[in-house]
Image (cartoon, grey):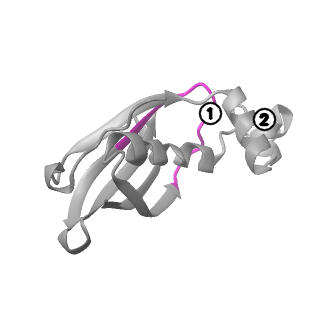
Amino acid sequence: MKKANEYDYDKIDIGSIFGFTKILSIEDMDNYANLTGDYNPLHCDEEYALSNNFKTRVVHGMLAGSLFSTLVGMICPGKKNLYLTQNLKFKSPIYPGSELIVRGEIVSKIDSIKAIVINTQILADNKIVIEGEAKVKII
């Protein structure tokens, strides 16, 4: 098992940026569909996606959005977190095989509850495809 980082609240600075890259495959999409039961043809049927003016099947937005859980749970703050909220705005389709840059920038801290606010983004081809904000309590 991979080891999560262990940032303490007072060691996390506003303006810090954390991230990683990931490529989601057709197999990842099929596994996600099987896990969740979301077999929408835009995600699972190549012909359907092509007939609706997409280049190929489109990655499930929530599959890509779940990468923010990796960002928070493994990178910053890592082990010492309790995920409070995450909002998402899906801006462009993501295609399997695209290299995704998953990043978060610490934009503020809430001292009273030892929580951080993270501006979250996923980029593909230097374009923001998902953006949002997370609030995470440091335990």
| Quadrant in the rendering for residue 125 | top left
Q: Looking at the image, do the residues carrying marks 2 and 1 touch, with CB atoms under 8 Å apart?
A: no
Left or right: where does residue 119 sit relative to residue 56?
left
Q: Residues within 10 Å of mark 1 (few under 14, many from 20)?
A: many
Circle 1 SS class? loop
Rendered image quadrant of residue 53: top right
Q: Quadrant of residue 76?
A: top left
Q: Is residue 90 left or right of residue 51?
A: left
Amino acid type of the residue tagged 2 in the rendering: Leu
Q: Where does the image place residue 78, in percent across and percent down from the top left?
A: 35, 45
**Chain part drawn in magenta:** 90-103
The disc placed on residue 95 is: 1
Q: Is residue 80 above or below residue 83?
A: above
Q: Residue at x 21, y 62 (%)?
A: 108
In depth, the one of 109 and 126 nearer the eye is: 109
- Whether residue 30 sits left or right of residue 128 in the image: it is right
> Compared to 45, does 106 lie above or below?
below
The C terminus lies in which quarter of the figure? bottom left
> In the rendered structure, does residue 94 fall within the stretch colored magenta?
yes
Q: Residue 55, how many percent across, how many down?
A: 69, 32
Residue 92 drawn at (x, y percent): 55, 46
